Image (cartoon, helix red, strand yellow):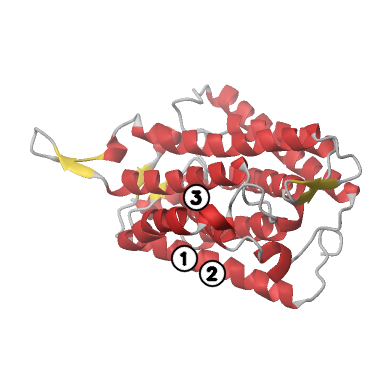
Amino acid sequence: MGILYQAADPIYWVIWLFVLFALMAFNELGRVKLWCGLVLFAVVPIALTLFVWPETAAPGNEYGTGTWFNWVKTYSALAGCLGFIALRFVKWRGKDGKTHYLYEKRWALCFPPLILAINIAEAVIRDFQVFGFALWQGGVVENLWTISGPWNIMNGIAGILNIITICGWFGIFISKDPSKDMIWPDMIWAWIIAYDLWNFAYTYNCISDHSAYCGLALLLACTIPTFFIKRGAWLQHRAQTLALWIMFVMTVPQFADVLAPIPTTHNPTAFFVVSLIALASNVALAAYQLYRIRKLKLNPLKDQIYADTKTYQRIVEENE
């Protein structure tokens, strides 16, 4: 990966692989066992908030974890995890004597796309903010190296398109197996790949020397389970792996800088190409989605855009 990254010691890539598989393993624990999910995403964060993060993620610390963005990202990711657990497991007995579930409420199904859009918007704002720093030759801001350029604007636009193309949330349902996963069948591979390319470009642009972990490894940690372990549960995988990683970074802030650094090459061409690919993929996704909406006369706020595709139908069949 000499074009994108440079690592002083190959052992750092071995550590990178360990991080990837650790994220996937803890994600599976939180997914298949309710009590594990509650411990990982409720009990542990409360303890860390009270006793650890005030010191390791203090404002102005030398590793850059004390910024507003890190704190907001941490709690928005945790809010997503806990909200999805509520959708999956909260139930009550109604006046009619029947058992009702939170996911049966249409207003509750608005939560997943809302928290997803908020998380993307946070990153879009950061891309534009980095452009505003005017560090055309590169520089250190909030203890992180970054470089401003047209790639920030390109990828900010890609992120906005990614938000616009979020679709089919009223088709979200809970799987019938014991894990009771939150399944979003309209979020097919095309959107996931476009998101991955955008998010990787965002991390490369704004958290450059940490992006091998918070970009490449973190995205693979949720994409691999989506395609090979539990299809249709991408957002659940994404929220949990993101929360796990950012809690770790807030607790061990020196990890990516001192313990196992994999810095970028700091090559402006790499920044431009990465963001160009992200923008092109999201433009293509938006164009294709608009084509389907017009051809099939769909309402993007109510209808499932990809309901007639084999991918969508396979996801539904596997989880009903």
At x 46%, y 53%, the residue is: 49
Q: Amino acid at mark 1?
A: Phe
Q: Which label was assigned to residue 239?
A: 3
Drawn side of residue 293 relative to residue 231, left or right: right
Badge 2 crowding class, 10 Å Cα cut-off, few under 14, some 14 to 19, many 20 or more, is some
At x 65%, y 48%, the residue is: 196
Q: Is residue 285 visible?
A: no
Q: How far is the residue under mark 1 from the one under mark 3?
A: 12 Å
Q: How far is the residue under mark 2 from the one under mark 1?
A: 6 Å
Q: Amino acid at mark 3?
A: Ala
Compare residues 89 and 134 and report the one nearer the observer.
134
* SS assignment at label 2: helix
Q: Which label was assigned to residue 26?
A: 1
> Marks 2 and 1: CB-CB under 8 Å?
yes
Q: Is residue 94 above or below residue 17?
A: above
Quadrant (top left, top right, bottom left, bottom right) of the N terminus: bottom right
Q: Amino acid at mark 2?
A: Ala
> Marks 1 and 3: CB-CB under 8 Å?
no
Badge 3 crowding class, 10 Å Cα cut-off, few under 14, some 14 to 19, many 20 or more, is many
Q: Which of pointers 1 and 3 lies earlier in the amino acid sequence?
A: 1
Q: How far is the residue under mark 2 from the one under mark 3?
A: 15 Å
Q: Is residue 25 above or below residue 45?
A: below
Compare residues 159 and 188 and report the one nearer the observer.
159
Badge 1 crowding class, 10 Å Cα cut-off, few under 14, some 14 to 19, many 20 or more, is some
